[in-house]
Image (tube, grey):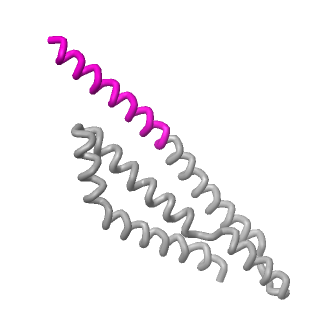
């Protein structure tokens, strides 16, 4: 029972995130390619997709609700193999935490690259005006 509670919600959240990405993929790509008329816009589009999946999956799963349900079942004297439960929830938490840290780093990289891109474009326009 409990392994299903750890497997099914991420799958449902991933399917919903996939649908959201598919619906908004073309509009976001059009907006970013219009703002950034360079090859770099593809990187930003990939970042937005990654962030959408990660936020959708990590926020779509209520791990604290699972802990509360486990406590209630334990209070009702249900037999639980707590070692397996701790391992599964620990691995799940590690995966989500790792992905969130990676997206956080990508966000800072995204911001830095955006500023550098703007600086390069400003310098290029100034150089073109001086010639």
Q: Is residue 47 above or below residue 61?
A: above
Asked if residue 14 lies left or right of residue 26, the reply is: right
Residue closest to the far left: 131
Q: Is residue 120 magenta?
A: yes
Which of 131 and 19 lies nearest the eye of the viewer? Answer: 131
Quarter containing the N terminus: bottom right
Q: Main secondary structure of the magenta part?
A: helix
Residue 83 in the image: x percent, y percent? 76, 69
Q: Is residue 102 magenta?
A: no
Residue 71 in the image: x percent, y percent? 80, 77
Which quadrant of the view contains residue 66? bottom right
Q: Which residues are magenta?
A: 106-131
Which of 75 and 108 lies nearest the eye of the viewer? Answer: 108
Q: Is residue 92 above or below residue 30?
A: below
- Tell me what residue is drawn at x 37 percent, y 28 percent: 116
- Tell me what residue is drawn at x 42 percent, y 39 percent: 110
Residue 57 in the image: x percent, y percent? 51, 65
Residue 78 in the image: x percent, y percent? 80, 86
Asked if residue 78 lies left or right of residue 43, the reply is: right
Which of 89 and 126 lies nearest the eye of the viewer? Answer: 126
- Tell me what residue is drawn at x 49 percent, y 38 percent: 108
Which quadrant of the view contains residue 23? bottom left
Q: Is residue 116 above or below residue 25?
A: above
């Amino acid at each position: 029972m409990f392994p299903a509670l750890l497997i099914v919600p991420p799958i449902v959240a991933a399917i919903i995130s996939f649908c959201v990405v598919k619906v908004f993929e073309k509009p976001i790509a059009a907006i970013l390619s219009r703002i950034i008329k360079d090859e770099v816009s593809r990187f930003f589009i990939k970042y937005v997709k990654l962030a959408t999946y990660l936020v959708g999956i990590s926020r779509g799963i209520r791990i604290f609700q699972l802990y509360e349900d486990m406590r209630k079942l334990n209070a009702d004297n249900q037999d639980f193999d707590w070692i397996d439960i701790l391992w599964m929830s620990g691995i799940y938490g590690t995966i989500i935490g790792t992905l969130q840290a990676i997206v956080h780093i990508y966000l800072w990289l995204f911001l830095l690259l955006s500023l550098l891109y703007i600086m390069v474009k400003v310098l290029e326009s100034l150089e073109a005006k001086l010639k």
